[in-house]
Structure formats: C-alpha cells, structure tokens
Image (spheres, rainbow, N blue to C red):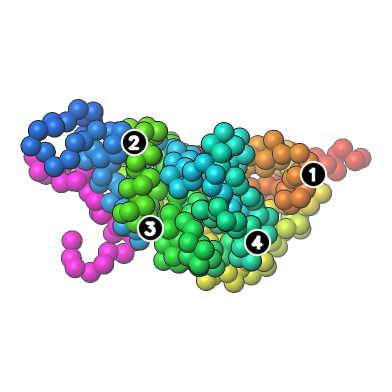
C-alpha cells in the first residue's frame, strides 16, 4: 500500500489481508488450524486466544475501520458486549447506561449483574448532565448506544466521552446501528467501541459475530477475560466476515441514500403520522447527528396513522418481516410484537413505542421499488379497513 492514509473503501477491501505466498491467489487464504507449533514461534496460536492468522488479519481491518489501535473478533455481538463490560467492572463497581439499549444488553445487565455484585443505573434522559447525575463513588463505566433502537435517538458522543474523562471512567459505545461507515466514536474520545458484526459488517443476514475496538492496553484487558470466557469466532466465519466487509462501504452508503429517500417519502405520506430518522430535519437530534455522523444510516422507524400494522405488513411484497436488521434486503418489524414484546404496555408507552410503530431496515434495492411496495401496501390496508367499516 502507498504512504497515503487509506480511505474507507480501501480499508474495507485491503487492510489486514493475508498474502497467498504459495499460489498468489487474490483473496486471503483461510487457516483453519486449531493446532499450531509451540517451539521457536513468536506467538502461541490457538483460536480461543483470538490470535489465529485470520482473526489477527480481520482485527487489523476492524481497528483501521474504527480508527482504533487494536481489536478482538467475537462469536456474537453479545459476547463482545458482555466481555467488554465485565472486563472493566468488578464486584462492588457501578455502571451508568442509557435506558434505550439493545434488548440483549438490557437483559445482560438486569438479569446477570446482580450475581456479580455489580450495581447499575439507567438514564432515560440522554443529556450529559443526566449521565453525570447517575455517577457515584464506585462508578467505573459509562455505556451508550447511538442511534438507538427503535426510535433512532441520538446520544452526544463527544459530551459523554468528555464526561467519562473528567470522572476517570471508561466510556463504551454500541456502534452497531451506525456502522463504522457512518460514525467513528474513537475520534470523539470514546474508549471502547463495540459492534454486533451480525448487522452491517456481515450485511447479508448470514453471519453471527461481534467486535470490540480500542487502545492496545484496553484490548489486552478485554482479551484477558475473553480467553477465559471463550467467545471467539470460528475462523471460517472470520474469513466470511472479512469478505463481507470488503463491500461494507458501498453497501452502507447505498443504504444511507435509500433510507433518506424513504424517510422523505414516508414523512409526506398521509397514512404515516411520524417518521424517526436522524437524516430528517424534523428529527429532534438532527443537528447533533450531523455533527457526529458521516451518514445517517439505513435504520428508520415510522408510525402508521389509523392503519393496522399487521395488515400493512401482510400486504408488503418486496419488504420482508424480519427480527434482525442491516442485511442488503429491506426488512420490517413491529417492535411491540418482537424486540419490545417483553416490556409492559406502560413501559413501551413510556419509551414512545406504540402498536402502530414500524421499524424499517433499509436494504440496497432500488428506492423506487421500495417506495412502490410501501405505497401499494398502504393502499391495500386502507381498502381493507374501509371494508371492515362498511
Ligand atoms: C444485534 C445487536 C446486538 C447483539 O448482537 P448479536 O450479534 O445478536 O449477539 C447488540 N447491539 C445491537 C445494537 C444490535 O443490533
């Protein structure tokens, strides 16, 4: 590579690639060994030590993508989340987290932390002042997720990073929804960046994986726990993930563009009462999003006006119902019936998640086709409801 600092798509395509010295093939060879020599070697390699050739190569790409020094690749996003949090939290410690978190992360904290003797506070208000109010003597970590699921709220990354520095705390962010294409929290002073690589990094709804990116020192600390917890990713999947990331830049940028067009279309539609997308000037955190994001992402949500969400979903032909997100195909879900089904109606109401809310993961199809699909489904749903009334 040249001395110029590589740009996004060059990092995606090339950083960390392994050379096929033997046959000079175009792609990284895959080393599936679980057993490596131990004499006269630099490192004692073993998949659960996170140091096989393919794991090291992909970690380099991850670190470059997030402007960090080092990275670890995990078997799932939750393995990355749990190992990172527990690496910096001990018995008697306290962590401040934002309330609107990925469900699995919320569950980890509320269902498991008590047995480790770790105390926690959630804040609904996302201002730095609200986070500061929750800081105690024994607080060690601040944890945020932005944009959040499903209402795409935006947390001020710089403000939280500064707050953590002022109080000597470790700041962590779940950067999954933005992806490294749209947001690089380390540039704002965040210590630990976590990804569910199952989402935009994988991008094809066929890989479960996680990643953590940070400084050498913090990655080493996370590694000390990771090797004991055993959450590494199979080298075969590491290799597939490396291939997927080659197109992440172009995929996510296409998804940004489609999501913007769809958000604008939905906002104008008479059957939609509200659209939540950080790229819309009507989004309450649009200015903040502009400050910290390079693109506004492929996730949006919207509320149907007087139309039944189940009926609407039934009439969609191109856009599929799906629990997960971030694939090249567009998918949709009702948070009330899926990701937030375990909350009580009051809790959902408090978080602003109504029965009419739809969460939309925008794919790379032609925007005009997606718009046409939504238009016909809205029309069919409206006719259905008229029939019922007549
Ligand atoms: C999916 C997801 C996770 C969990 O990742 P898994 O790969 O499913 O373990 C964590 N955070 C966010 C924001 C997610 O969307």
Disc 2 CB within 8 Å of nearest ligand 1 atom: no
The numbered mark, 1 or 3, whose residue comes first in the sequence reads 3
Q: Which residue is mark 1?
A: 346
Q: Nearer the viewer, mark 2 or mark 1?
A: 2
- The front one of 135 and 297 is 135
Query: How many residues crowd around disc 3 within 10 Å: few (fewer than 14), some, or many (20 or more)?
Result: many
Q: Residue furthest right?
A: 390
Task: Point out residue 67 in the picture as x, y percentages from the top left corner.
Answer: 35, 61
Q: Nearer the viewer, mark 1 or mark 4?
A: 4
- The front one of 136 and 233 is 136
Quadrant of the rendering where the C terminus is positioned: top right
Q: Secondary structure at mark 1?
A: helix
- The front one of 149 and 295 is 149
Residue 102 figure quarter: top right
The numbered mark, 1 or 4, whose residue comes first in the sequence reads 4
The numbered mark, 2 or 1, whose residue comes first in the sequence reads 2
The alpha-carbon separation of the residues under discs 1 and 4 comes to 25 Å
């Amino acid at each position: 590579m040249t001395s110029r600092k590589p740009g996004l798509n060059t990092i995606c395509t090339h950083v960390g690639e392994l050379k096929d010295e033997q046959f000079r093939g175009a792609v990284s060879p895959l080393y599936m060994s679980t057993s490596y020599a131990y004499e006269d070697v630099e490192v004692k390699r073993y998949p659960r030590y996170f140091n096989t050739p393919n794991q090291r190569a992909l970690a380099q790409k991850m670190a470059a993508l997030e402007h960090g020094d080092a990275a670890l690749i995990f078997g799932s996003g939750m393995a990355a989340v749990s190992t990172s949090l527990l690496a910096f939290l001990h018995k008697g410690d306290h962590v401040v987290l934002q309330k609107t978190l990925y469900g699995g992360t919320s569950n980890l904290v509320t269902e498991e932390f008590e047995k480790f003797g770790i105390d926690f506070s959630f804040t609904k208000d996302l201002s730095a002042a609200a986070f500061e109010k929750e800081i105690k003597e024994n607080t060690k970590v601040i944890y945020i997720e932005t944009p959040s699921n499903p209402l795409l709220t935006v947390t001020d990354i710089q403000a939280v990073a500064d707050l953590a520095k002022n109080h000597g705390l470790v700041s962590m962010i779940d950067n999954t929804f933005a992806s490294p294409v749209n947001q690089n929290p380390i540039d704002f002073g965040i210590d630990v960046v976590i990804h569910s690589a199952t989402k935009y990094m994988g991008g094809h709804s066929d890989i479960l994986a996680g990643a953590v990116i940070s400084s050498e020192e913090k990655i080493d600390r996370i590694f000390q726990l990771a090797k004991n917890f055993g959450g590494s990713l199979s080298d075969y999947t590491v290799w597939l993930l490396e291939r997927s990331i080659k197109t992440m830049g172009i995929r996510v940028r296409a998804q940004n563009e489609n999501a913007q067009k769809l958000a604008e279309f939905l906002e104008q539609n008479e059957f939609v009462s509200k659209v939540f997308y950080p790229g819309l000037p009507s989004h309450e955190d649009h200015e903040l999003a502009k400050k910290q994001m390079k693109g506004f992402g492929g996730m949006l949500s919207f509320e149907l006006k007087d139309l039944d969400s189940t009926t609407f979903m039934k009439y969609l032909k191109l856009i599929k119902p799906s629990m997960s997100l971030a694939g090249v195909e567009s998918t949709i879900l009702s948070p009330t019936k899926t990701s937030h089904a375990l909350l009580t109606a009051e809790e959902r109401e408090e978080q602003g998640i109504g029965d009419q809310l739809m969460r939309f993961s925008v794919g790379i199809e032609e925007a005009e086709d997606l718009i046409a699909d939504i238009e016909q489904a809205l029309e069919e749903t409206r006719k259905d409801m008229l029939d019922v009334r007549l």
